[in-house]
Image (cartoon, rainbow, N blue to C red):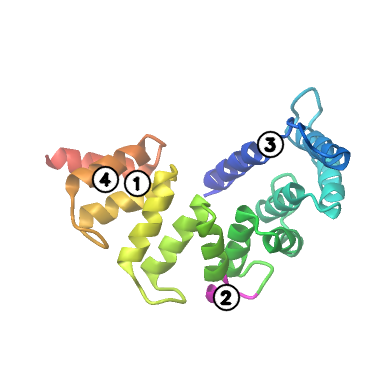
Amino acid sequence: MKIRKFRYLIILVVFLCLGCATHNGLSDDQIKMDQDYEYAMNVYTGQNGEEQDYDKAVSLFSASAKNNDIRAQVFLGIIYVYGAGVNVDYKKARTLLEKAAERGHPKALFQMGDLYFKGRGVKQDYEQAMIFYKKSALKGDKWAQLSLGNMYLSGKSIEKNYKTAFEWYEKSALQGNDIAQFNVGFMYESGVGIMQNTEKALEWYKKSAQQDNKEAQKRLKILLGAN
């Protein structure tokens, strides 16, 4: 589980760094905000000649977050959730992520859903989790799409609907989420939410297995061994 969490964080770093050095057509204030954020990220990751210093990076991100840099609010909120270079602090995470979620940031919306789903920094509330997951999923976040699929599959806060669960898993799987790819494969194999199709199951298991998903690798061995 920790490996998946930090893999998610690495993906987030890459996502939030995209466009850091692009300043064409921006105001001086926006250029300064971008430069401050890029510097903070370099200090956090120890890249581009900067010495890695988590405490300094958090201070820099905090200043950017107070200046309404939505990227800093999201990144700082998430590292407080995972304890990546800081102590886990769900209340601080919620405060930061809530601000970004109010502005419609898909990853902040997903993380807010996760906080409500798991009762971290807030009272556990599956209905609120569903609301945030759906807002994020509709904006294309693959982790929110996966989480929505899980909720429809399990029937938490909503009536079970295997067909809808499959649809959300498929959206996530098409974006390369290995867990969703495994789930799509399993639903094809078992005929839950979709017509049973072993060939399709194998296709999705292979995609998932190529990303080192152990469960997919196990199912592949079983199915291929049976053929």
Element type where label 1 sits in the image: helix
Q: In the image, is residue 61 above or below residue 50?
A: below
Q: Which residue is mark 1?
A: 215
Front position in the image: 139 or 80: 139
Q: Amino acid at mark 2?
A: Asp
Mark nearer the viewer, 2 or 4: 2
Q: In the image, is residue 28 above or below residue 137?
A: above
Residue drawn at (36%, 63%), measured in percent from left and top? 165
Taking the image as shown, residue 77 lies to the left or right of residue 175, namely right
Q: Which residue is mark 3?
A: 17
First reached walking from the N terminus: tag 3 or tag 2 = 3
Q: Residues within 10 Å of mark 1 (few under 14, many from 20)?
A: some
Q: Are marks 1 and 4 in contact (CB under 8 Å)?
A: yes
Element type where label 3 sits in the image: helix
Element type where label 2 sits in the image: loop
Say which quarter of the image contains residue 97: bottom right
Q: In the image, is residue 71 above or below residue 92?
A: above
Q: Amino acid at mark 3?
A: Cys
Q: Residues within 10 Å of mark 2 (few under 14, many from 20)?
A: some
Highlighted magenta segment, given as a residue range: 123-128
Q: Which residue is mark 2?
A: 125
